[in-house]
Image: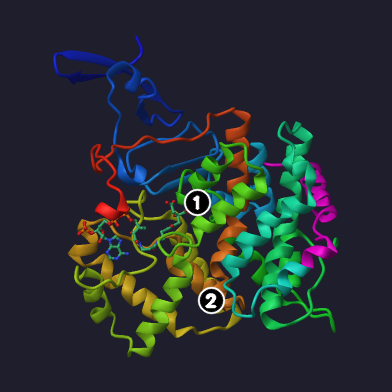
Amino acid sequence: MSETASLNLGDKTYELPVTTGSENEKAIDISKLRDQTGYITLDSGFKNTGCTKSAITFLDGEQGILKYRGYPIEQLAEKASFLEVAYLLIYGELPTQSELDNFQAQLSQHALLHEDYKKFYDGFPPKAHPMGQLVSLVSSLSAFSPESLNPNPSKDDINLTIIKLLAKMPTIVSWIYKGSLGEPFIYPQNKLDYVSNFMNMTFGQVTHEIEIDPVVVDAMNKLLILHADHEQNCSTSTVRIVGSSEANLYASISAGVSALWGPLHGGANQAVIEMLERIKEDGGDTDKWIAKAKDKNDSFRLMGFGHRVYKNFDPRAKIIKKACDDILAKLGINDPVLEIAKKLEAAALSDPYFVERKLYPNVDFYSGIIYRALGFPTDLFTVLFALGRLPGWIAQWKELRENKEPIGRPRQIYVGETERDVVEIAKR
Ligand code: SDX
């Protein structure tokens, strides 16, 4: 006998089916609720609403658990490369060596951008925010890939579109950075692996070869893995709902980049560093800023703290915090904002305001300190988040299309004016 939920409305009782996931999560299936009862549900911010069944990522906010296709994030961060994790998210299994080599070869083949594509960069003013550029540049890929606009794409069409986007994103991102410096673009090098190639295009020079520090490449791999997917967060839900209209992959991912830009979401990593710098300039009085974060009359929030789902700790933040210490030590960097971050964390975790609201450091709290240590400018941090999240967005879009999910179209409860007659302007 499958489990049901009873709903009493007036003198009627309705039995609603309950769905149980592979990790024993439970959902009341309301897909026929309105037809049966005339009622809809209301859930601002979708805090209690599932939009899909997905086999990609599982997270448990109470236990601080995050797994990609069943593999714990802690193990993937230690034992896999970002490209292996991208393959896992998109195709469902970790690759064998030959599968990974073939995947890397396909990406190398498509890492270049059409020479006409470079003209887009000329149109941005030097201080244009990198996320605004990325939104435009990702969507513009469809202009150079007609197969991506096929209304009934074959599996090969879809896979080619995926490969092209994954291959070109490091080039697009590194050229945004080079463009901001007025430096010549560095082209992809097939002899380099995915992350080393990105680091070379970002920090390389046309005048000479640069040494790419393996410590830096390892740190970047780890950061990208930790950002790779996170089930139905704001930007992934955006990618899904745009994809549900059968918009092409580039348009769907571009929409996800837009959603990620917000300071409450991926934009938080930039906001955290700006906050830490502000506290440092202000003398480093963390107690003063904790008080501001708690003050309802003060718009200041502790950026990098709190999470919609994690109500214990963000497992990614724990890994990044340790990586922060390791990498700064290995690179011999002493960043004063790291100490301020640790003081803030310690103060917040012992303060009832944060404890009662279950506010802990999230993925964005320490990541910016590492990005800065690796040489990236602050306004590029959220773009780096997008680079990491790309395989997750792609996997979720692919799953939605393969499952032929319906176009997303939520309902509402209308609270505006009831019917009234128009009065001509002369009589108003
Ligand atoms: C990401 O969803 C994902 O998975 C996202 C992400 C991913 O990988 O995709 O994990 C990436 O977006 C991480 C979050 C990055 N954002 C920030 O660090 C911005 C700061 N955090 C907050 O804005 C907030 O915590 C959110 C947006 C993350 C979560 O907001 P919720 O779940 O809507 O919670 P809320 O705003 O309703 O807050 C509940 C209470 C409120 O106080 P009360 O009204 O109950 O008195 O907690 C307070 C809030 O005022 N609060 C904070 C706070 N976060 C929440 N108070 C001070 N500082 C904060 N950071």
Within 10 Å of the Cα at label 2, are there few (<14), some (14-19), or many (20+) other Cα atoms?
some
Q: Tag on residue 406?
A: none
Query: Label 1: few (<14), some or many (≥20) within 10 Å?
Result: many
Residue 360 seen: yes
373 in the magenta segment: no
Tell me the residue at 52%/67% (across/down): 323
Place residue 55 in its image quadrant. top right
Q: Position of residue 409 (x, y in %)?
A: 45, 35
| Image quarter in which the N terminus is found | top left
Instruction: Find ligand 1 in the image and state its quadrant.
Output: bottom left
- Main structural element of the magenta stretch: helix, strand or loop? helix
112 magenta-colored: yes
* Front position in the image: 329 or 159: 159
> Three-letter amino acid code at disc 1?
Ser
Q: Secondary structure at mark 1?
A: helix
Where disc 2 sits, the SS reads helix
Task: Report which residue position mark 2 lands on.
Answer: 378
Quarter of the image for the C terminus: give it.
Answer: bottom left
Q: Is residue 391 visible?
A: no
User: For residue 336, what is the image quadrant?
Assistant: bottom left
Label 2 vs 1, first from the N-terminus: 1
Instruction: Name the residue beneath numbered marker 1.
Output: 235
Give the magenta range.
Answer: 94-118
> Is 208 positioned to the left or the right of 322 in the image?
right
